[in-house]
Amino acid sequence: MDGKTLGLVGAAAILIAGAVAVRLLPAPRVVSAEEQQQEGPRIVEPMQLLGRGAALRVAELDEWIAEERRPRFRAARDQVFHIRDCPESVAWLDGAEGQRVERLLGELRHGSREEALAALALVFQLARATEWDPGVLASIPEANAARLAGLAADWLRAWGERGARDPLLAEPTRAAALLYGRLMYMAQHSRVIGTNTSAYERGLKTLSELVGLDSGRRTALGESLQSRHPEAMRKLALESDRLRGFDEEARTAFPDLDGECGG
């Protein structure tokens, strides 16, 4: 066998060996959209930012807020997390600080997913630090719960569908739906005699739209709630007292959100 033939045989052997080696290499891993979203720095344990220990971590959110909103967010979180003496929700929100916080919440809802989480952290702390249990001593029994519920509803309308599919926001989105249902259930039962029919109908309409109950086709939020809170979804489809399941689930998940500042 001459040198030219030997060269051809050697080249063929190298090609065959290379092909075998390539086949033995592991296939490249397909990265899902959810994993791509979580690449790089991310917020871990987002539900801690909605819990009673949120004050220990809320400052971590500063770096995720758009630069033009960051100073106002710092001021808002400082105000909300230092509310004292359990004021009624409406009274605090109608004050100068509350109005600034409410305007900022609107901006955060239209920002990034991290800013949406920051907005929800403020809403949950407002529910924790202000009074909305419609007892007989409240000045406007149903208004406090309904006012906070409106903040939760605005957030859910902006992020309910996207949040239900988002690995960062999926659990907080379900929590927001439970909180909304609990608040509207409390507004419904704000009267000493009878129930507040308008609050009940408003709460039921909002939740039904958010989960796709009336259309007969569940939304992403509806599917997410069905998977984790099936009893709340079952009771939502009953003929009476349909907000009760959300109230019960919220009481279990957030026992300190009692409308009396944990008292």
Image (cartoon, rainbow, N blue to C red):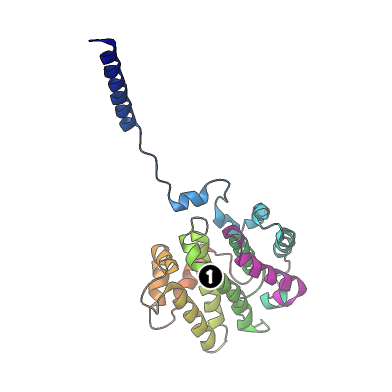
Q: Residue 206 appears at what percent x and percent y?
A: 49, 78
Viewer-nearest residue: 123 or 214: 214
Q: Bin the neighbour count of mark 1 within 10 Å (Cα to Cα): few under 14, some 14-19, many 20 and up.
A: many
Q: Is residue 16 at least partly visible in the picture?
A: yes
Residue on which disc 1 sits: 156
Tag 1's secondary structure?
A: helix
Q: Quadrant of the N terminus?
A: top left
- Residue at 64 percent across and 54 percent down: it is 64
Q: Amino acid at mark 1?
A: Leu
Q: Is residue 111 magenta?
A: yes
- Residue at 31 percent across and 20 percent down: it is 11
Q: How many marks?
A: 1
Viewer-nearest residue: 165 or 200: 165
Name which quarter of the figure residue 229 lies in: bottom left
Q: Which residues are magenta?
A: 93-115
Q: Residue 78 appears at what percent x and percent y?
A: 73, 60
Q: Which residue of the protein is positioned furthest toward the left in this rendering?
A: 1
Left/right of residue 14 with respect to residue 222 in the rendered view: left
Left/right of residue 84 with respect to residue 257 in the rendered view: right
* Vertical order, 39 against 125 (above or below): above
Q: Main secondary structure of the magenta part?
A: helix
Q: Residue 62 appears at what percent x and percent y?
A: 68, 54
- Residue at 57 percent across and 69 percent down: it is 155
Q: Quadrant of the C terminus?
A: bottom right
